[in-house]
Each structure stands twice: as C-alpha cells, then as structure tokens.
Amino acid sequence: MTTERHYLADEAATLELGADLGRRLAPGSCVYLRGDLGAGKTTLMRGLLHGLGHRGAVKSPTYTLVEPYEVGGVPIYHFDLYRLGDPEELEMIGIRDYFDGRALCVLEWPDRGRGMIPEPDLTVTLTVDGRGRQANLEWAHGQH
Ligand code: ADP
Ligand code: MG
C-alpha cells in the first residue's frame, strides 16, 4: 500500500486534488471517500468531475444514493451512502451492476455499505485541520 498526505488550505485546493485524482485513476477504479459531514468529500468529487471535463452541476446524492455521470465516454458513479439504513438496500438499486470494471465508482460513507461493495483501489480520508483540510490517500496497489 502507498500512502500520501496533502494539506488542503482552502476549497480550491480540494478541487485541485480531485482533478488530479481524476487524471490518475484508471477506469474501473473504486474510490472510498471517508470523513465527517463537511469534511469536503463532495467538493473533492466536484473537482474530479470538472477536471475530467464534466461541465454541469455536481449535486450531493444524499437522497438518491447514487448520481450517474458520463464524461469522455467513461461512466462515473458518485454514491453517498449516508442515509442508507441497511446495506441490503443496495441490493434493490442493483448495486453490482455499477461495479462493472469499466465505470469509475466513488463512494461517500462507504462503511455503511459494508459487505455489498468492492474493496477500494484508493481510500481518501479528509479531516478538518485549522481552516483547511488534511487529505490522507491510501492506494491499494502501489504507485500512481
Ligand atoms: P462533505 O461532502 O464531506 O459533507 P462538502 O464537500 O459538502 O463536505 O464540503 C463542506 C464544506 O467544506 C464546503 O463549504 C466546502 O467549501 C468546504 N471545504 C472543502 N474543502 C475545504 C478546504 N480544503 N478548506 C476549507 N474548506 C473547505
Ligand atoms: Mg457530501
């Protein structure tokens, strides 16, 4: 496992890290975004999508569980499992179909889907640090 730490002084730095990750992640990757409410998970995802060329809005899929995108021909699924009551509910939205080896899947609150989602290729943990954020990256398969 390879780890990295980044200090993100402001929102722009979070967006930039997201854009950088979008360039580094292979299609078919699974990314976990960990951190408390307000830590910057959705902001990071906005940076990732905009960095890859998505021009529209990026809304938090808190109530819908998943928001689908297609950027440059690659399907990207943004999950937010915060409101998930029971991991079994993921069965009902056909969770397995999203992880098809081609789509990039990014999940906020992945621990709530335990047992129903694949192991991550990258875990990003965001924590509040002063006025900014600390980002801890854990790559499962070495250098990127
Ligand atoms: P989450 O999805 O983790 O609940 P959000 O992405 O919605 O969090 O972000 C919450 C707030 O944190 C937003 O107002 C955003 O502008 C702010 N924010 C994001 N990154 C930073 C940063 N590096 N420093 C300061 N504020 C940040
Ligand atoms: Mg969020």
Image (cartoon, rainbow, N blue to C red):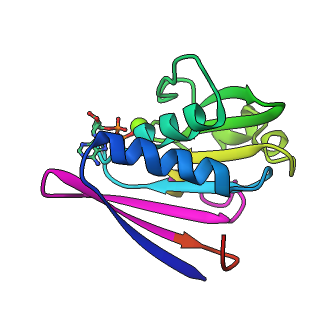
Tell me the magenta residue range.
112-137
Q: Is residue 126 magenta?
A: yes
* Quarter of the N terminus within the rendering: bottom right
**Is 132 left or right of 50, judged from the image as shown?**
left
Q: Quadrant of ligand 2?
A: top left
Would you say residue 59 is visible in this rendering?
yes
Residue 114 or residue 137, whichever sits in front: 137
- Residue 31 against residue 85 in the figure, above or below: below
Would you say residue 84 is visible in this rendering?
no
Residue sitting at x 65%, y 63%: 120
**Residue most toward the left?**
130
Q: Position of residue 62 (x, y in %)?
A: 47, 29
Q: Quadrant of residue 121?
A: bottom right
Residue sitting at x 61%, y 55%: 31
**Is 33 left or right of 7, judged from the image as shown?**
right
Q: Position of residue 28 (x, y in %)?
A: 80, 52
Residue sitting at x 79%, y 40%: 98
